Amino acid sequence: MAFSNESDHGALVLGTSSLGARGLDEAALETARALIGSGLRIDTSNAYAGGRSEQILGLALATLESAERDAAASRVITKVDRDPDTGVFDASRVRRSCEESLERLGVDHISMLHLHDPYTVTVDEAFGPGGAVEGLVQLKQEGIVDAIGIAAGPVPLVRRYVDSGAFDAVLCHNRFTLVDRSASDLFAAAKDLGMTVFNAAPFGGDLLVRGPRPDARYDYRPIGDALRLWTAGFFRVCTSYDISAAAAALRPSTTSPLVDHTVVGVSSPQRIAELLAAHSENIPDALWSAIDALGPVPSPIDDTEYEGA
């Protein structure tokens, strides 16, 4: 395993799944202003914090002058989500979700719009008449969005959407990290189709930043003893080379030719600063050999239930 230090600063995308989780308060607005002031792309969703993530970003955008606001808004990527009450995810719901996002953000146009976690419909339903994909394509044809993507976790499911050729981008999370590389072939296929690739959650949630504490999880699920031991070894290696675990966990994504953008969730201005610092660390090649020496990584992810989706 060897990774370059030549990673593209602009390829980082700041995730906002936790923005607004504690309500619409000054701390959330301060974070939104820092997100916008970073100059980086921002990833949000109709469903994050029940819509408050987009709402708070919209309030922060509204404080900017027109030209500055337009430039910042062009860096915001959002996602359409199923109806939160019924689970319906058809073309009509896609349009309503998009309209809700436009209103919250205070814009009339979105640079990129993802189909987010389409788990309440089958792939055939999503591509059928009146399905979610048709709704996304219509929004692109109308010029309301510039590009459309598919954003989800399970690789076999996401691959069905990628192979359709209907999308401009793909976002997959927790499956291209030091722990799990199962999205490698998916990303390679997407690149072959000329799609933009977003790799999200390179820290596996926060396991590769906070370590194997008692309540540690990877991809929202508890970790087993084997992964706990491997992670403890990973942290020992990072300490021995005086490299932050965040820097080591981030670098495989930001230097991979398969990845265009790396999405990392941040919850405060301090977290943004810490991420940028980790991104800039110089990592010696010997670190990767030491990580390799820890042996195979026991990923807890099992996407077999989605095979043949």
Image (cartoon, rainbow, N blue to C red):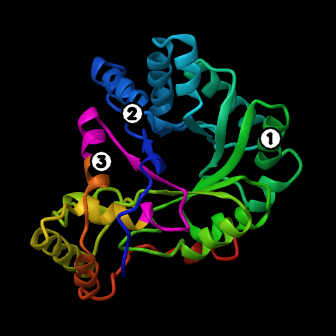
Q: Which mark is residue 275?
A: 3
Magenta stretch encompasses residue 106? no
Horizontal and vertical percent for residue 299? 38, 77
- Which comes sooner in the sequence, label 2 or label 1? 2
266 or 283: nearer the viewer:
283
Q: How far apart are marks 2 and 3 (CA)?
A: 11 Å
- Which comes sooner in the sequence, label 3 or label 1? 1
Q: Give the label, 2 or 1, closer to the camera.
A: 2
Q: Tell me which amino acid carries mark 3.
A: Leu
Horizontal and vertical percent for residue 138? 84, 38
Task: Name the residue located 19 percent from the left edge and 60 percent from the top edge.
Answer: 244
Tell me the magenta residue range: 253-276
Q: Tell me which amino acid carries mark 1.
A: Gly
* SS state under label 3: helix
Q: Residue 135 carries which label?
A: 1
Asked whether residue 216 appears in the rendered view, the answer is no
Task: Name the residue located 62 percent from the left edge and 41 percent from the top edge.
Answer: 81
Q: Distance between the residues labelled 3 and 1?
A: 36 Å
Quadrant placement of the N terminus = bottom left
Q: Is residue 277 above or below residue 205?
A: above
Q: Is residue 272 above or below residue 214?
A: above
Give the residue pinned by disc 2: 38
Q: Residue 246 carries which label?
A: none
